[in-house]
Amino acid sequence: MGIGTLATVIDGLPLALPAWTQLAAAGVGATSGAVYAAKRGFDVVGVLLLAVAEGLGGLLLRDTLLQTGTSIVLLDGRYLLVATAAAVAGFFFAGLVDRLEGVILVLDAVALGFFCTVGADSALGISLPPIAAVFIGTVTAVGGLVLRDLLAGDAPRVLRPGVFTAAAAFFGALTFVLLETWTSLPSGQSQILAMVVVFAVRLLAVRLEWRTSAASDISERVWSIWARTEDGGR
């Protein structure tokens, strides 16, 4: 694809995503959280709590960190209604939803990309530096997953070795911030391009089994090299 063709494709992208997109992303996360809770035998309150945590937790963390006032998920009652509906679906139809693993993975990748760009855009909107915007974007994307696992009594999966999730969100937030600071593209087009990056990284990571690794302590190796260097210099 040539530069001219790429420019044509970008110009054809919408200037902004529809207003309901954020609600849809929250619903995807809430459904995932509800199924996660139902499969582990939580009662109705537990399923609802984990649905709210995963679906809305990232936005709550974003608004708390940015100190921009009462969170949108509390000001707009539709968010809690969406999370409640997802909890009902997860409570009664967890097995059916779980069979749609491929569809859920695709929707989850889209939601991950959406949340990381929304978080980064909110940070840039109040003039935070780019590095802070990348951080806020990543936290917004994976914050719900972290809260869900903590409430379920598990070590957060996004903090343990595994297929890229937080890494995909980081690359998406970084892409969005770079496009916003280095180009004159409208925010909506930057957001869509960054979401494509997250979508591609997330699905390729699952397909090709790209995994993060555990911490590797090389202290002894460095110390032995240093010791040999010291001995050789005498």
Image (spheres, rainbow, N blue to C red):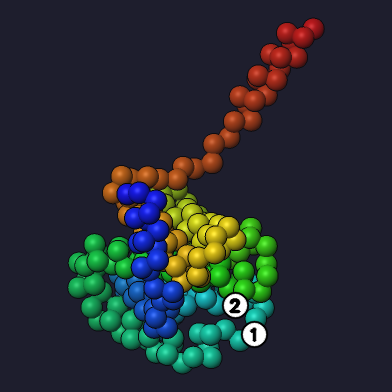
Sequence-wise first label, 1 or 2: 2
The mark found on residue 20 in the picture is none
The mark found on residue 63 in the picture is 2
Quadrant in the rendering for residue 25 = bottom left
Q: Horizontal placement of 143 versus 46: left or right?
A: right
Q: In this view, does 70 lie above or below 195?
A: below
Circle 1 Cα neighbour tier, 10 Å, few/some/many (<14 / 14–19 / ≥20): few
Q: Residue at x 64, y 85 (%)?
A: 69
Residue sitting nearer the eye, 167 or 149? 167
Quadrant in the rendering for residue 82 = bottom left
* Residue 218 spot, x, y in % from top left: 59, 31
Extreme residue in the right direction: 234
Q: Horizontal placement of 135 versus 24: left or right?
A: right
Quadrant in the rendering for residue 32 = bottom left
* Residue 119 spot, x, y in % from top left: 54, 70
Image quadrant where one finds the C terminus: top right
* Residue 110 spot, x, y in % from top left: 36, 66
Extreme residue in the front direction: 4
Q: Can residue 26 be seen in this view?
A: no
Asked if the residue at tag 2 contacts the one at tag 1, i.e. Cβ–Cβ closer than 8 Å, the answer is yes
Q: What residue type is labelled 2?
A: Asp
Q: Residue at x 35, y 61 (%)?
A: 9
Q: How far apart are marks 1 and 2 (CA)?
A: 7 Å
Q: Label 1's element?
A: loop
* Residue 162 spot, x, y in % from top left: 41, 49
The mark found on residue 69 in the picture is 1
